[in-house]
Image (cartoon, grey):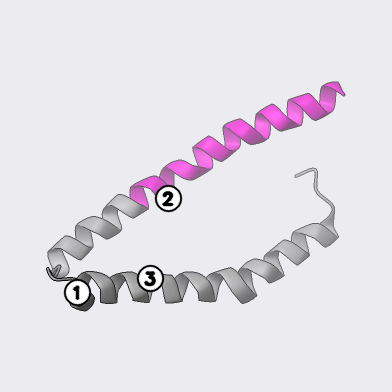
Amino acid sequence: MPIERVLIFQAKDWIDMFEYRMFKVLGSVVILLLTRWLPWSADAVQLGWLVLTVCKFWWLTPFVLRREYVRVRTAAAEY
């Protein structure tokens, strides 16, 4: 990647320290919301389908990001 190594390590530190914990909390809140706090409750099968749906979008994300990365990289090379 055409990014300085310092920035890569800083981004990795940010992801490891903050975002990982934030998404664990967010996932826990979503599970509590869907199983306990809403008037209706989701069972394990419904949560499984939710996880599969989220995984599908998560799996598609690199393809979208790659397209954008190639666009930015070619624009930078032309500059």
Highlighted range, magenta: 55-79
* Main secondary structure type of the part rendered in magenta: helix
Residue corresponding to mark 1: 35
Residues marked 3 and 1 touching at CB (< 8 Å): no
Residues marked 2 and 1 touching at CB (< 8 Å): no
Q: Residues within 10 Å of mark 2 (few under 14, many from 20)?
A: few
**In the image, is 46 to the left or to the right of 1?**
left
The residue located at (68%, 69%) in the rendering is 14
Foreground mark, 2 or 1, reads: 1
Q: Residues within 10 Å of mark 1 (few under 14, many from 20)?
A: some
Under circle 3, the secondary element is helix
Residues marked 3 and 2 touching at CB (< 8 Å): no
Q: Earlier in the sequence, mark 3 or mark 1?
A: 3
Residue corresponding to mark 2: 58
The residue located at (83%, 26%) in the rendering is 77
Residue 57 at x, y = what percent?
39, 46
Alpha carbon of mark 3 to alpha carbon of mark 2: how far?
A: 14 Å
Alpha carbon of mark 3 to alpha carbon of mark 1: how far?
A: 12 Å
Return the residue nearer the eye: 69 or 28.
28
The residue located at (81%, 29%) in the rendering is 76
